[in-house]
Image (tube, rainbow, N blue to C red):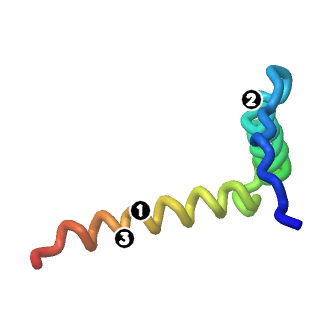
Amino acid sequence: MIPSRSAPVRAGGAARGQASLEYVVVCLALALALGIGLWNDQSVLWQLLDALRVAYQRFAYALSLPT
């Protein structure tokens, strides 16, 4: 028996934008979890921001070197 091809299932109007809402909720939860203890210099969020700052400084320095 040959399987028949069916039309693709389309998302209804209520389902549109749900992924972006879920993305925002997850990002907010992650920022909240990392931001707990923000007043301390040893918090995970401060360490992450410092690591990103150092990585960007090293990247910018490497780009400025002559080839």
Q: CA distance from mark 1 to mark 3?
A: 5 Å
Horizontal arrangement in the rendering, residue 17 relative to residue 64 (left or right): right
Circle 3 SS class = helix
Front label number (1 vs 2): 2
Q: Work out which residue is located at the far front of the displayed protein and give it.
A: 1
Circle 2 SS class = loop
Q: CA distance from mark 1 to mark 2?
A: 33 Å
At 27% from the left and 69% from the top, the residue drawn is 61
Observer-nearest of 27 and 63:
27
Front label number (2 vs 3): 2
Q: Which residue is mark 2?
A: 17
Horizontal arrangement in the rendering, residue 50 relative to residue 8 (left or right): left
**Quadrant of the rendered image containing residue 4:** bottom right
Q: Amino acid at mark 2?
A: Gly
Circle 1 SS class = helix
Q: Position of residue 35 (x, y in %)?
A: 78, 48
Query: Does the CB distance between marks 1 and 2 fall below 8 Å?
Result: no
Q: CA distance from mark 2 to mark 3?
A: 38 Å
Q: Amino acid at mark 3?
A: Arg
Q: Which mark is residue 58?
A: 3
Q: Position of residue 43 (x, y in %)?
A: 76, 59
**Quadrant of the rendered image containing residue 17:** top right
Instruction: Give the quadrant of the N terminus.
Output: bottom right
Observer-nearest of 15 and 39:
15
At 56% from the left and 61% from the top, the residue drawn is 50
Q: Which mark is residue 56?
A: 1
At 76% from the left and 54% from the top, the residue drawn is 40
Instruction: Give the quadrant of the C terminus.
Output: bottom left
Q: Specify few, some or many for label 3: CA neighbours under 10 Å numbering under 14, 14-19, or 20 or more.
A: few
Q: Specify few, some or many for label 2: CA neighbours under 10 Å numbering under 14, 14-19, or 20 or more.
A: few
